[in-house]
Amino acid sequence: MSTVTYREAMRQALREALQRDERVFLMGEDVGRYGGCYAVSLGLLEEFGPERVRDTPLSESAFVGAGIGAALGGMRPIVEIMTVNFSLLALDQIVNNAATLLYMSGGQFNVPIVIRMTTGAGRQLAAQHSHSLEGWYAHIPGIRVLAPATLEDARGMLWPALDDPDPVLIFEHGTLYNAEGELDDDAGAVDITAAAVRRPGTDVTIIGYGGTLRTALGAAEELAGEGVDAEVIDLRSLRPLDTDTFVSSVARTHRAVVVDEGWRTGSLSAEVSARITEEVFYDLDAPVARVCSAEVPMPYAKHLEDVAVPRVCDVVDAVHRSGA
Amino acid sequence: MTAMTPAGSEATSEAADHRVHLLREMLRIRRLEERCAELYSATLIRGFLHLAIGEEACAVGVMEALRPEDAVVATYREHGHALARGMTMRSVMAELEGKVEGCSRGRGGSMHLFDSATRFFGGNAIVGGGLPLAVGLALADHLQGQHRVTACFFGDGAVAEGEFHESMNLAALWHLPVLFCCENNLYGMGTALERAESETDLSLKAAGYRVPSWEVDGMDVLAVEEAAGRAAEAVRAGGGPHFLELRTYRFRAHSMYDPDRYRDKAEIEQWKHRDPIPQLVARLSAGEELGEGELDRMEAEVAAEIEDAVAYADAGTLEPVEDLERFVTSPEPAARP
């Protein structure tokens, strides 16, 4: 076991991928000489050289599209986009090309690309660097959407994502990079198809992912002090959703609270809630509750940002309202 | 029969045969598209149908410069590119009729012809959206040490898109083997170039990225072939991206829905005088390269090929609706550890 940060776990995963497969290369804005906007790729340029760790101009559409083209041409590109808000400049390539080419070509051209990006609030970066738009991407057929919330997943999701013959988007919550913990020295690939029960419990199911897993676990701790035994589910894969895991949990606990840093309207939490209602409606003892971000562009001032995103106390309140 | 042939005559006859071949290729595209228009009226083809009638020399001339291992990224006006690249008329026609025998299994239609065998990467219907793909294909070739060319077709309309500028810059910056082929037909749908661009000299845009460019008469297949050949070899030899501005014109409307209110009839007629097919016929006839009755024979052969393709498509099968979700993702799921 070693003590590592989420950032270092990601970097280990990148290094392993570059070592294991010569088709793999990393490209994006400032991934090389700068070391990565969030220092995830620090040192990789020196280790693997400028052909395989490629700094790009500020041309999201071109370098994401070039990643798609390189994937069509037999490579296994990892494309880093600084933040999910910037990915909107490449939305055409992701949605109109990466997600459609296999289908549109009648199965001839698959796109084995991995696109990583930062998401989420909590760093006072205001309304153009802080949103949680992964739910939008989870709407799109043809792409897999992952949200590593733990060190194991930060370390282990990249390799199976690269093994996937189709496009995979990985969303890294910006406040997780400095999270530190123990990681097995031989930690490696993890399953990317299933949700995980991060804390077993019997009274209520709290469902989160990425940055909101901590919030859900924090709420569960607080609730434990009140004698409420909450089960916490980490969705891990936002598309496809592992419905069975959260639905079977709710069937046991009879109550559900969904925690999503996206806006409530048309959100991933709405999808999760709808699936619970569709599958286990008659097992519910209370309506499904949702804790989402306030429907505002993310504010800069800390006291405003703090209340704009789901907090532990909001989740605890929601659990109380559900009668647990 | 003479025992001796003058040294030059075999080469000359080969060159003449080649020019006849170019004529045949243009004729195949022209007649197929004319038939498509009929089939559209007969509702056998639906969706958007964009005909390239008038622009055949561009597709035919450029494809002659490519090798089988090269790649092609085309637009939604790509029937001609597909045929000239070597895709069969049958697979194209079956696609237009939405049959599973189509080159994209009926999933793409007119705007999305694909073929892995000829490395034909669509059929892209977002204007400018294919350019980054071409840059990426070229990047893959560069990283794999392959001396291949990626030819990327787009219209003058795409020049207004950010993806054009980002892609030109990236290809030039990384010295990638892309042959950018701009089919400048003077209109982005209904908007004339001078109403869309502050600078209508497109080669200046290429120059802004230090990309060598040629302006080519896109109504002259021999001129296109010659320029594309030089450019493709320069690209293949490691000369970085090159840009061809193929000056052409579409004789028909933008699509079957377009009433064509924005073009002067006289302008259309004027361009029709430069129709690439009669131009080449006249040239070959004058040089006695097209024998007596040869054009009629060619027309008959092309007509037979088209009717065979239509019959093939008509007899084709519809994909079972149970397969609706097939190929949203690849057949093999993501690996588990």
Image (cartoon, grey):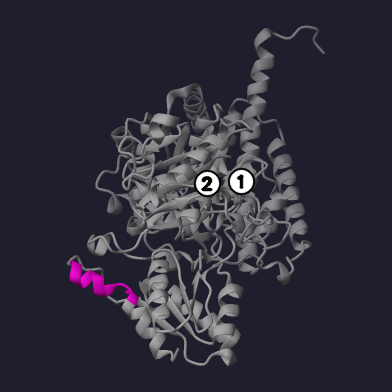
Which quarter of the figure has residue B246?
Answer: top left
Q: In this rendering, does residue A116 appear at all?
A: yes
**Disc 1/disc 2 C-alpha distance (Å):** 8 Å
Q: Are there few (<14), some (14-19), or many (20+) residues within 10 Å of tag 2?
A: many
Q: Nearer the viewer, residue B167 or B199?
A: B167
Report the side of B199 relative to B292 (left or right).
Answer: left
Which quarter of the figure has residue B27?
Answer: top right
Q: Nearer the viewer, residue B58 or B123?
A: B123
Chain ID for label 1? B
Which residue in the protein does label 2 denote?
Answer: B74
The x and y percentages for residue A253 are 54, 84
Q: Which disc is residue B115 wearing?
A: none
Q: Main secondary structure of the magenta part?
A: helix
Q: Is residue B171 above or below residue A309?
A: above
Q: In this rendering, does residue B184 appear at all?
A: no
Please give the range of residues in magenta. Answer: A302-312
What residue type is disc 2 on?
Answer: Ala
The x and y percentages for residue B256 are 52, 63
Q: Secondary structure at mark 2?
A: strand
The x and y percentages for residue B291 are 70, 30
Q: Would residue A130 be counted in the magenta stretch?
A: no
Co-location on one chain, circles 1 and 2? yes
Chain ID for label 2? B
What residue type is disc 1 on?
Answer: Ala
Q: Is residue A100 above or below residue B238?
A: below
Which residue in the protein does label 1 denote?
Answer: B82
Q: Would residue A309 be counted in the magenta stretch?
A: yes
